[in-house]
Amino acid sequence: MWGGRFKGGPSALMREINASIAFDKRLWREDIQASLAHVVMLEAQAIIGEDDASAIAEGLERIADEYALKGVPEDPALEDIHMHVEARLAELIGPAAGRLHTARSRNDQVATDFRLWTRNAIDEADAALAAFGRVLVARAEAHCDAVMPGFTHLQSAQPVTLGHHLMAWFEMLRRDRSRFADARARLNESPLGAAALAGTSFPIDRDATAAALGFDRPMANSLDAVSDRDFALDYLASAAFCALHLSRMAEELVLWASQPFAFVALPDDFSTGSSIMPQKRNPDAAELVRGHAGRIAGQLVSLVVTMKGLPLAYSKDMQDDKEPVFLAHDLLLLSLQALAAMVEKTAFRTERMRAAAEAGFATATDLADWLVRCAGLPFREAHHVTGRVVALAEERGCALADLDLAALQAIDARIDSRVFEILTVDASVKSRTSYGGTAPERVKEQIKRAKKTLNV
Ligand code: ARG
């Protein structure tokens, strides 16, 4: 396709290092879609004739059918997907195929194809996030007043509800969706017509091709259009954030599934056994979601480093932009689907969660607050008194609510029997009614708002 000025063909090694067909064949749909938009425009602008244009369009449709049926047959003599499509077109329609590449370069072509692909990837990620969100909301609704320990430093801190915890996960996913949506809005401009780097002397209509491909507008600067890969980095950054969230959720499932916690029983079809320890039920899928997050973040770093030293406009280094995005996307979708399915089928052992919340003196803050509110102590003093009450309960091996009034009054005479109303974990969660707090009525409001955004 570019051999005119050369005496000999490329060496085998040159071919090998230059070829991208093994991975960029994934762009075949987008490549044909963009070529169809281009050829329609070329004809409308009278840059090519009607007969050639319809032969090209029909040929492209036929190639799409062939690839859909049998995949892309890889020819090692042809570098990339753009050449594969064009070479097949020449086989099908003859010399007219050579007119398709008028007023275009592989530089704006690949940028266009890859933007289209990434836009689809964003839409797929968004759909998977929405599906996971629906699972979380359903499970949160069923457990909006199930008490569990809330942790800081992984120490029992204050009682919360399982519904509240699951809705915290939901919020992480909601931000991920908005990050992908931002990336999509920035991505959605068309590089097509930037040609190699400087634009073209043909009277093309960039608005028409942009509109045909669903882009909001053509990119403003042809040099930028062929050298920008921010859209791929935006995708990877959004994916890395999302994967990091999935990893934190997965880590909690691993922890909750461990015997000392036993907060959840993982579904059989998402657990694995051990070949030597018959009692084992391992949370492999959750661990792999956690592991994949590292690889996804790695793909972001990979492309950042590829791009950082490149002068404008196109350099071949940029051929390495695709594999990180493809791999990150595959790993992300799999992780989203697997984790959503796990969460959907996990049995929450709410009796264990409640017992853990009761065991950890998690209502100590409630006692301190009560001493301030009802007994008039300054908070610092209330904190100290509460510390002595906790020490006593620890010594007796009982919960705060199980201490008798005389023992409490021996620590501070200002304590009276009303205190027992606030020492239980249920009273504690019910009292946290501030906006966004763990009180079941607040959690229900959160769920209601979430359902609205999910259209459920
Ligand atoms: N396969 C190439 C890539 O993915 C297409 C662009 C080739 N452009 C060029 N000037 N060699 O980047």
Image (tube, grey):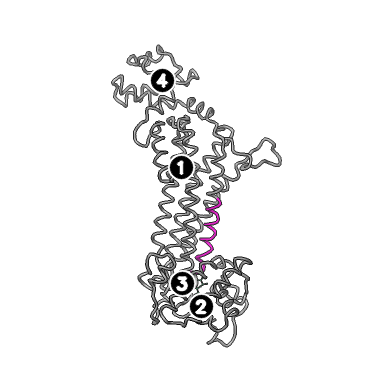
Query: As drawn, is 310 to the left or to the right of 322?
Result: left
Does the magenta run of residues contain 327?
yes
Please report the residue visible at 41 percent of the width from the left and 31 percent of the height from the top: 440
Q: From the viewer's perspective, is residue 77 above or below residue 387?
A: below
Which of marks 3 and 4 precedes in the sequence?
3
Task: Considering the whole magenta stretch, tell me its main secondary structure.
Answer: helix
Q: Secondary structure at mark 4?
A: helix
The residue nearer to you, when weighing 367 against 102, is 102
Q: From the viewer's perspective, is residue 359 above or below residue 344?
A: above
The span picked out in magenta is: 318-334
**In the image, which is nearer the foreground, mark 2 or mark 4?**
2
Q: Which mark is residue 37?
A: 3
Give the image location of residue 353, x and y in percent. Answer: 51, 30
Task: Give the distance between the C-alpha atoms of the residues marked 2 and 1, in whole angstroms.
Answer: 52 Å
Q: Secondary structure at mark 2?
A: helix
Give the image location of residue 59, x and y in percent. Answer: 56, 75
Q: Secondary structure at mark 1?
A: helix
Residue where numbered disc 1 is placed: 169
Q: Visible in this render: residue 14?
A: no
Q: Which mark is residue 389?
A: 4
Please report the residue visible at 50 percent of the width from the left and 27 percent of the height from the top: 354
Residue where numbered disc 2 is placed: 54
The residue nearer to you, when weighing 121 against 56, is 56
Give the image location of residue 256, x and y in percent. Answer: 54, 36
